[in-house]
Image (cartoon, helix red, strand yellow):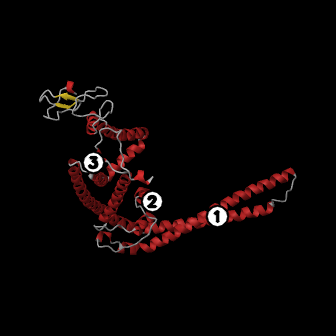
C-alpha cells in the first residue's frame, strides 16, 4: 500500500499532458493541497496583523447612544433616528477621547441622573405590566371557574370543586389589584414623560453633538478601512507578482517546480481578489449598497430568478474551466506530441521508429513531406519541425 502511495502517477491514458512540469506523486499532491490551505490561512493571519497597524478611530460610547435611545424611544417623530443608534444593549462608557468631538463628559454629567431615573421607571413599568398580565390571566381563569359553578348550580349538581363565594372574592381582589397597578402605571408614565419633557432641550443639544461626532467617525473609519485596504493590496500584489514571475520563469524552462509556484500563485491570487473586493465594498457609498439590497429584496421575481439561475451559473463556471483544461489536454497537437515522445503510433499505439513515415502494424502515416523544405515532419502538427513553416491543410 505504501509503495503505491509514493509511486509516481503514470497517466499514459491522458494523452498530451505536460508531464514534465506537472507530474508528482500522490504524496506530492497531498502536500500541495496542504501548502494551498496553509497559504490561505497564513494570508488571513497576515491581513489581521495589517488591520492592527493603523489605530482604529475612537467610537462614540454606547452609553451616549443609550441615553439618546432611552429619551427618544417613545417619541414617534424620532423613532427612525432612535432605531439607528445601534448597540444600545451594551453600556460601555469610556468618555475620554483625544478627539474633542468624541468627548461627552459634560453632556453625560448633565443627563446621567435623569437617564438613571428613566431607566428605573422603565424597569418598574415593565415589572408592573408583567404583574398586571399575570393577574388578568388569573382573573380570567377565576371567571371560568365561576361560570362553571353557576352551571353546576343550575343543573342541580355540586362537585365541591368550585366555591362560588371564594371565587367571587378572588375576582374582586384581582380587580382591585389591577386597578392599583393601572394607577401606578399612569403615575409612572406621567413621571416618565415629565423627565423626558424637562430634558428635551438637553437631549437636542446632545443629539447635535452626537451627529457631528458620528459624521466625523464615519469619515475617519472609512479612511481607516481604505488605509488598511491599501496596505493589504500592496502586500498581496507584491507577493503575487513575485510568485507569478517565478511561475512564468519555471514554466518557460519546463521545470518540475512549476506546479509548486502555480499553486502558490493561485492562492495569493485569491487573496488579492479578496482584498480588491473589500476595497470596492469600502469605496461604494452605503446608500448605493442599501438601494441595491432593497431593490433585490423588494423585487422578488429577480430573487427567484437568481435562485433558479444560481445552480446553472455554478455549473457553467466550473464547466467552462474543466472544458478549457480538457481542451488543452486532449487537443490534437498534444495527443500527437505525447505519442511522438513515447515513440508510438497515434492510431494503434504500437511502438514505432519515428524516423519512418508509416506504422508497420496499421500502415498509419506518421510523417509527411513538408511542401516548403521537402523534409519529413510529423503529420498533424501545425508547423514543420525542420523549417518552422506552417504546414498545408492536406499535410495535416
Q: Quadrant of residue 297?
A: top left
- Work out whether residue 341 or residue 322 is closer to the camera in this orientation and state it: 341
Position of 168 with respect to 67 (left or right) is: right
Residue at x-position 66% and y-position 66%:
177
Residue that carries the numbered disc 3 in the rendered image: 21
Q: Residues within 10 Å of mark 2 (few under 14, many from 20)?
A: some
Residue that carries the numbered disc 1 in the rendered image: 179
* Precedes in sequence: disc 2 or disc 3: 3
- Callout 2 secondary element: loop
Q: Residues within 10 Å of mark 3 (few under 14, many from 20)?
A: some
- CB-based contact (under 8 Å), mark 1 and mark 2: no
Q: Quadrant of residue 206?
A: bottom left
Q: Look at the image and tell me in which quarter the C terminus lies.
A: top left
Of marks 2 and 3, the one in the foreground: 3
Measured from the top left, where is residue 47 in percent x and y?
31, 61
Say if 106 sits above or below 186 in the image.
below
- Callout 1 secondary element: helix
Residue at x-position 14% and y-position 35%:
386
- Callout 3 secondary element: helix
- Confirm whether residue 302 shows in the render: no
* Precedes in sequence: disc 1 or disc 2: 2
Say if 113 sits above or below 302 in the image.
below
Measured from the top left, where is residue 329 in percent x and y?
31, 39
Q: Residues within 10 Å of mark 1 (few under 14, many from 20)?
A: few
Q: CA distance from mark 1 to mark 2?
A: 27 Å
Residue that carries the numbered disc 2 in the rendered image: 75
Q: CA distance from mark 2 to mark 3?
A: 71 Å
* Precedes in sequence: disc 3 or disc 1: 3
Amino acid at each position: 500500500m505504501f509503495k503505491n502511495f509514493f509511486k509516481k502517477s503514470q497517466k499514459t491514458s491522458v494523452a498530451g499532458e505536460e508531464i514534465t512540469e506537472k507530474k508528482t506523486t500522490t504524496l506530492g499532491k497531498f502536500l500541495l493541497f496542504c501548502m494551498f490551505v496553509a497559504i490561505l490561512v497564513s494570508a488571513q493571519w497576515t491581513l489581521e496583523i495589517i488591520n492592527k497597524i493603523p489605530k482604529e478611530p475612537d467610537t462614540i460610547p454606547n452609553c451616549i447612544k443609550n441615553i439618546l435611545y432611552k429619551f427618544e424611544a417613545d417619541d414617534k417623530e424620532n423613532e427612525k433616528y432612535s432605531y439607528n443608534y445601534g448597540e444600545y444593549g451594551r453600556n460601555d462608557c469610556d468618555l475620554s477621547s483625544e478627539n474633542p468631538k468624541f468627548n461627552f463628559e459634560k453632556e453625560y454629567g448633565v443627563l446621567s441622573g435623569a437617564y438613571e431615573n428613566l431607566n428605573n421607571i422603565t424597569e418598574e413599568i415593565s415589572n408592573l405590566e408583567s404583574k398586571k398580565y399575570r393577574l388578568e390571566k388569573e382573573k380570567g381563569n377565576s371567571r371560568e371557574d365561576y361560570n362553571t359553578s353557576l352551571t353546576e348550580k343550575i343543573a342541580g349538581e355540586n362537585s365541591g370543586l368550585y366555591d362560588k363565594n371564594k371565587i367571587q372574592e378572588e375576582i374582586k381582589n384581582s380587580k382591585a389589584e389591577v386597578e392599583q397597578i393601572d394607577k401606578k402605571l399612569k403615575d409612572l408614565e406621567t413621571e416618565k414623560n415629565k423627565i423626558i419633557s424637562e430634558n428635551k432641550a438637553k437631549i437636542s443639544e446632545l443629539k447635535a453633538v452626537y451627529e457631528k461626532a458620528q459624521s466625523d467617525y464615519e469619515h475617519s473609519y472609512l479612511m481607516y478601512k481604505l488605509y488598511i485596504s491599501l496596505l493589504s493590496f500592496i502586500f498581496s500584489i507584491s507577493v503575487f507578482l513575485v510568485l507569478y514571475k517565478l511561475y512564468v520563469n519555471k514554466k518557460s524552462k519546463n521545470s518540475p517546480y512549476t506546479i509548486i509556484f502555480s499553486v502558490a500563485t493561485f492562492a495569493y491570487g485569491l487573496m488579492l481578489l479578496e482584498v480588491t473586493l473589500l476595497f470596492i465594498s469600502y469605496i461604494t457609498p452605503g446608500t448605493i449598497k442599501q438601494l441595491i439590497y432593497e431593490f433585490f429584496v423588494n423585487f422578488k421575481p429577480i430573487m427567484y430568478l437568481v435562485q433558479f439561475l444560481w445552480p446553472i451559473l455554478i455549473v457553467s463556471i466550473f464547466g467552462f474551466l474543466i472544458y478549457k483544461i480538457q481542451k488543452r489536454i486532449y487537443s490534437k497537437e498534444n495527443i500527437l506530441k505525447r505519442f511522438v515522445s513515447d515513440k508510438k503510433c497515434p492510431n494503434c499505439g504500437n511502438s514505432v521508429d519515428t524516423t519512418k513515415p508509416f506504422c508497420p502494424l496499421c500502415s498509419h502515416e506518421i510523417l509527411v513531406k513538408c511542401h516548403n523544405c521537402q523534409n519529413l515532419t510529423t503529420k498533424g502538427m501545425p508547423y514543420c519541425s525542420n523549417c518552422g513553416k506552417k504546414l498545408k491543410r492536406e499535410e495535416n
